[in-house]
Amino acid sequence: SVCHKQIRRFRHSAAKNMAEEAKKKAAYAAVDNHVQNNQVVGVGSGSTIVYAVDRLAERVRQEKLNIVCVPTSFQLDVAIDGADEVDSDLTLIKGGGGCLTQEKIVAGCAKHFVVIADYRKDSKTLGQQWKKGVPIEVIPMSYIPVSRTIARCFGGEARLRMAVSKAGPVVTDNSNFILDWKFDQAQDWKEVNTAIKMIPGVVETGLFVSMAERAYFGMEDGSVQVRD
Ligand code: 5RP
């Protein structure tokens, strides 16, 4: 009957409200008990985490907390990052600092990925500005075969990145090595990126293809140029 339907709907909505309130309570408690000033906080995914983010924001406002949040899901609205070079199609070279894998994961999680760079990174085609090549993160034992395969298939040279002290190779946050591939000609970056990722031992490339939707370039004259 109509009456029974209404009762069912009412119960359903009351249960939902209660569950939402419970999520909120749990989220607030966790944030209040575990998050302190100057911490790096991983933010996961789901509907409960939304309340945790609300509480984090509230505490940042009220207590002037200084925290860094690292997201782990597709629920990121916007990611902002620098780049080593940006071409006219918004294809990027990233990983000059060796963090390309994490950076690509974060960029891939964002609905909008925005690049910020100074005028020196602005390029018509990749390789015109950034001369150090495309960083490629590899499993340590694979660096020689990967480097040979890249040179054979795509030309140029892929060199192991060494620490500034020259004491040994640079080791990434993921305990891997970095090859810097100096290519000798412009390529179809989408194809090359896919092909390199297929080589056994490759973890990730510093080629960001079709990821950035906008770049802001700070120009020498103090203006900002936007590329979409
Ligand atoms: C690190 C990166 C950086 O975003 C890139 O190297 C640009 O850095 P900066 O803004 O210092 O020039 O990809 O892996």
Image (cartoon, rainbow, N blue to C red):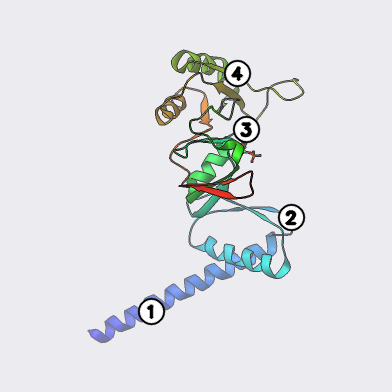
Q: Is mark 3 within 8 Å of ligand 1?
A: yes
> What is the distance, in whole Å, between disc 4 and disc 2 at their CAs?
37 Å
Residue 142, relative to residue 71: is it above or below? above
Q: Secondary structure at mark 3?
A: loop
Q: Secondary structure at mark 4?
A: strand
Which residue position holds label 2?
38
**Disc 1 + disc 4, Cβ < 8 Å:** no
Task: Say which mark, if any, is on residue 197.
Answer: none
Which residue position holds label 1?
11
**Amino acid at the residue labelled 2:** Asn
Q: Badge 4 local density, few (<14 within 10 Å), some, or many (20+)?
A: some
Residue 196, relative to residue 3: is it above or below? above
> What is the distance, in whole Å, between disc 3 and disc 1 at their CAs?
56 Å
User: Which numbered disc flags the more N-terminal residue, 3 or 1?
Assistant: 1
**Amino acid at the residue labelled 1:** Arg
Q: Is residue 80 left or right of residue 192?
A: right
Provide residue 199's location: percent of width, then percent of height: 46, 22
Provide residue 90's location: percent of width, then percent of height: 47, 40
User: Which numbered disc flags the more N-terminal residue, 1 or 4?
Assistant: 1
Which residue position holds label 3?
96
Provide residue 1's location: percent of width, then percent of height: 22, 84
Which quadrant of the render holds ligand 1?
top right
User: Which numbered disc flags the more N-terminal residue, 4 or 3?
Assistant: 3
Residue at horizontal 51 percent and vertical 26 percent from the top: 202
Residue at horizontal 52 percent and vertical 31 percent from the top: 204
Task: Say which mark, if any, is on residue 159.
Answer: 4
**Disc 2 + disc 1, Cβ < 8 Å:** no
